[in-house]
Image (cartoon, rainbow, N blue to C red):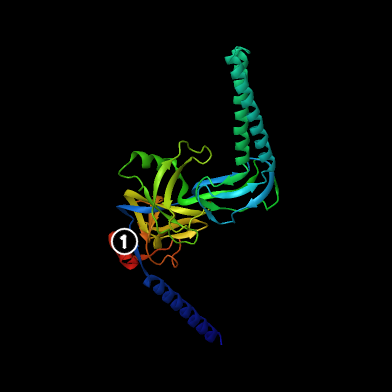
Amino acid sequence: MKRKVVFTGLIALLSLISCNNKKEEKEEAITYTVTNPVVVDTSFTKEYVSQIRSVRNIEIRAQEKGFLQNIYVDEGQYVSVGQLLFKIMPKIYEAELLKAQSEAQAAQIELQNAKMLADKNVVSKSEQAMAQAKYEQAKAEVALAKVHLSFTEIRAPFSGTIDRLPKKLGSLIDEGELLTTLSDNSKMFAYFNVSEPEYINYQQNVKDRADNVVNLLLANGKQLKYKGKVEVIESEFDNETGNIAFRASFPNNDKLLKNGETGQVLMKVPMHKALVIPQKATYEIQDKKFVFVVDKNNILKSREITIKGEMPDLYVINSGISVDDKILLDGIQKANDNDKIKYDYLEPKKVIASLRLKAE
């Protein structure tokens, strides 16, 4: 009985050893693909968050106090330059104009009489001059009354689109109160912030500068079909962010863009001697990117990297690895830190070529 127990235990031990050997053989059977980062002259498209603004966007405000008598437009309506938009009840200003005109007529008559008497030496020339001054003052009052009356009719200063109308017909309007906003969307501006090093490269390095022809990625993930152009760089850096604002202009023939939209300006940036790796050679943990580096003993070591730019299927590396490091290309999901592996080496240029062919 004792021999039977020993014999059974021996069989179990041999079975366990056999299973472990098979597991080790299976693990050793996995052969990974390894490559190196490569240095290339290339370019990548950088995305900048942008705010979209109309070429002209102004507030239309009342210049006189009164009741809103007429509204001639609707929200979202396109209007032409000089078109009548609003009318504030003009009765008071009409009366003021009539009064001013009457006083001007009286002053004119006084001036005529003073001139006639001065010619006959009945009154002095100084009295004629006083009558003349009084008449000129009366004419100025007429001109001022006409201006106040004209302010009761509010017209479009340029062609554009009417925004919301916060005041309704019959509302009592104070001087300076907002009536609506007018936007000229014939051309649009996209403002985006650029870091100080990028700004210096753009200004000093003509060969390495970003292209001034840019694209605009809209909020739905699609590009605007019209290309834009960087036209203006603001005069000061933001002390808090260290950035400076660029302005690109875009045609808006389809009237798709509106004031206040957001998007991303896509700027092509050339890169000389850029260190690139395939995107599939990386993995991510808590918004940080890593690669597996193979050391001289064929053991995997996890290494954090930072990304300078992004291209289709490729990352431009800022820091973390060098051109001499061997990195794991395939089998990232199966690999673990400190694993000892067998691998086949693949030339990095062949890797990049295969990625491009696959993308095409």
| Name of the residue lying farthest toward the front | 120
Q: Is residue 333 visible?
A: yes
Q: Quadrant of the C terminus?
A: bottom left
Q: Mark 1 packing: few (<14 Cα in 10 Å), some, or many (20+)?
A: some
In front here: 115 or 228? 115
Q: Quadrant of residue 5?
A: bottom right
Amino acid on which the number 1 mark rests in the picture: Ile
In the image, is residue 226 above or below residue 29?
above
In the image, is residue 121 above or below residue 232?
above
Q: Is residue 62 left or right of residue 310?
A: right
Q: Helix, strand or loop at disc 1?
A: helix
Q: Position of residue 90 (x, y in %)?
A: 66, 43
Q: Is residue 27 left or right of residue 207?
A: right
Q: Position of residue 281 (x, y in %)?
A: 39, 61
In front here: 272 or 37? 272
Q: Is residue 297 visible?
A: no
Please report the residue visible at 63 percent of the width from the left and 26 percent of the height from the top. Answer: 109
Q: Is residue 290 left or right of residue 272?
A: right
Q: Position of residue 295 (x, y in %)?
A: 37, 56
In front here: 42 or 111? 111
Q: Quadrant of the N terminus?
A: bottom right
Q: Is residue 65 left or right of residue 181?
A: right
Please report the residue visible at 56 percent of the width from the left and 46 percent of the height from the top. Answer: 155
Please report the residue visible at 48 percent of the width from the left and 82 percent of the height from the top. Answer: 11
The residue under label 1 is 352
In front here: 157 or 280? 157
